Image (cartoon, rainbow, N blue to C red):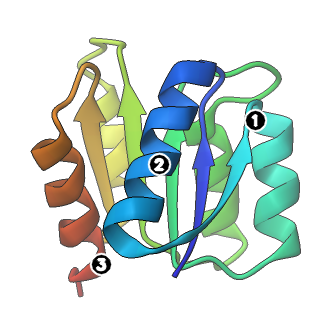
Amino acid sequence: MRVLVADDDPEMLELVSNIMRRKFHAEVTRAATGHELLEHIADTEWDLIITDISMPWMTGLQVMHSARTAGLPVPVVVMTALRNPELAGQVEALGSRARLIFKPFTYKELLAAVDAVEHAA
């Protein structure tokens, strides 16, 4: 399983990356900015992307909307500490293989979101 994890918070990036490695034995690539996320998306085929919304240069949500426009159907979990009511609709616009989770989230919430995007039609 190839997973791309993007977050500008080094601790969150480390935590989510380690969970993906340990739970799914995933090969994890990390991105700390929207620019890095966009570059990595263009370089490789991914089984899963987990991205924060608020990052430098370009938000994770903007990158994922661009990826969807380009025809990339990869499952995505979008994580955020923002409490903007419009975010749910923006993530829903990414399709059935996208889920929004709010920080702080539990281990079980992250795994449930991953499971939901992997098994969505």
Q: Alpha-carbon distance for marks 1 and 2?
A: 21 Å
Residue 43 position by quadrant? bottom right
Residue 102 spot, x, y in % from top left: 25, 27
Q: Residues within 10 Å of mark 2 (few under 14, many from 20)?
A: some
Q: How many marks?
A: 3
Amino acid type of the residue that numbered disc 2 sits on in the rendered structure:
Asn
User: Which residue does the numbered mark 3 point to in the structure image?
Assistant: 118
Residue 58 spot, x, y in % from top left: 75, 29
User: Which residue does the numbered mark 1 point to in the structure image?
Assistant: 34
Left or right of 31 in this view: 77: left
Closer to us: mark 2 or mark 3? 2
Residue 30 spot, x, y in % from top left: 70, 47
Q: Residues within 10 Å of mark 1 (few under 14, many from 20)?
A: many
Considering the image in quadrants, where does the C terminus appear? bottom left
Q: Secondary structure at mark 2?
A: helix
Q: Alpha-carbon distance for marks 1 and 3?
A: 23 Å
Residues at circles 1 and 3 in contact by the CB criterion of under 8 Å = no
Q: Secondary structure at mark 1?
A: helix
Task: Specify which label sits upstream in the sequence, 1 or 3.
Answer: 1
Taking the view exactly as shown, the residue that stands out farthest to the front is 22
Q: Residue at x 51, y 82 (%)?
A: 1
User: Which residue does the numbered mark 2 point to in the structure image?
Assistant: 18
Residue 39 spot, x, y in % from top left: 88, 55
Task: Specify which label sits upstream in the sequence, 1 or 2.
Answer: 2
